Image (cartoon, rainbow, N blue to C red):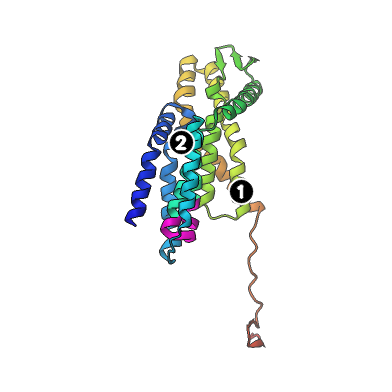
Amino acid sequence: MISILGLAAVLFWSLWPVLQGLWDRWSRDPRYAHGQLVPVFALALLWVRRDRVVDEVRRPSSWGLALIIAGAVVQAAGGYFRQEAVEAFSLFPYLSGIAVLWGGRRALSWAWLSIAFLAFMIPLPWRLENALGPPLQASATWASVFGLECLGFPVTSEGNIIQLAGGRIGVAEACSGLSMLMTFIALSTAVALVVERPLLDRATLVLSSIPVAWIANVARITLTGVLYETLGSRAADAFYHDLAGWLMIPFALILYGIEIRILSGLLIEEREAAPAAGIVRCDEGTGPRATAATA
């Protein structure tokens, strides 16, 4: 056990520059502010699933060394090509290897969900961010313009600029909705991991995070436009830059609650029917038996 803890400490030390870079990114980039909470939830998930190792006999396996070697290769490749995201992904084979060394396959079956959830704390590659940003900006702009028109406000758009009578709203790259998308995917996955629902319900919950994030971002921009036209630019700016990000989380949770309620009515679990009166279930090896129903 002491040797495993020592190995874990060495791996943690080797990844310290990468982890420090992740923390700096979480602190200054609002798109990945949720990264600070991801390890906390991963640890909580380990605690919730602790019965998988408490009630079973652990069988340490040397195959964990192969996973740690694979992690070292990934980390070395990321360092050689100066790809921080690749270096960060070496954390997964490292943690999996530590789990296998400590308790074999049973320990890995206990820890793998928490290890996989840590993927949400790693920023997307730069090219993928640039590929997702412009389409999200454009769709959020035209949908918000449509919403404001439906509410009766005079509005036009020029590119990603929404022109109102009381001011202009720029749907910048930071307001494209990518931050909400990343946060809501992590949030819906966390909810799906802890909620007691059928697998199809939980998969639907995770997939729905994409439209929920888009709806939340459009609602934020539309409400900002309404505030521009009714209360002025100061109130609209305060809402857009300060309050909106906090209010969208409970808004998303409300949407998820509505979705779970709808799924509960659409997808009904099959339950084993109770035996009819006067009929006793056959026991294996004893043959069928029946009793007369009493009035």
Q: CA distance from mark 2 to mark 1?
A: 21 Å
Instruction: Name the one closer to the observer, 161 or 24.
Output: 24
Residue 174 appears left or right of 150: left
Under circle 2, the secondary element is helix
Instruction: Name the one closer to the observer, 58 or 247.
Output: 58
Q: Which mark, by number, is residue 34?
A: 2
Q: Going from the N terminus, do you reach mark 2 or mark 1 first?
A: 2
Q: Which stretch did the figure color magenta?
A: 100-112
Mark 2, residues whose alpha carbon is within 10 Å: few (<14), some, or many (≥20)?
A: many
Q: Residue 154 location, x and y as percent?
A: 64, 15
The quarter of the picture where residue 258 lies is top right
What's the amino acid at mark 2?
His
Q: Does the residue at mark 2 contact the one at mark 1 (Cβ under 8 Å)?
A: no
Q: Main secondary structure of the magenta part?
A: helix
Residue 105 seen from this side: yes
Residue 121 seen from this side: no
Q: Residue 148 location, x and y as percent?
A: 62, 22
Q: Which mark, by number, is residue 203?
A: 1
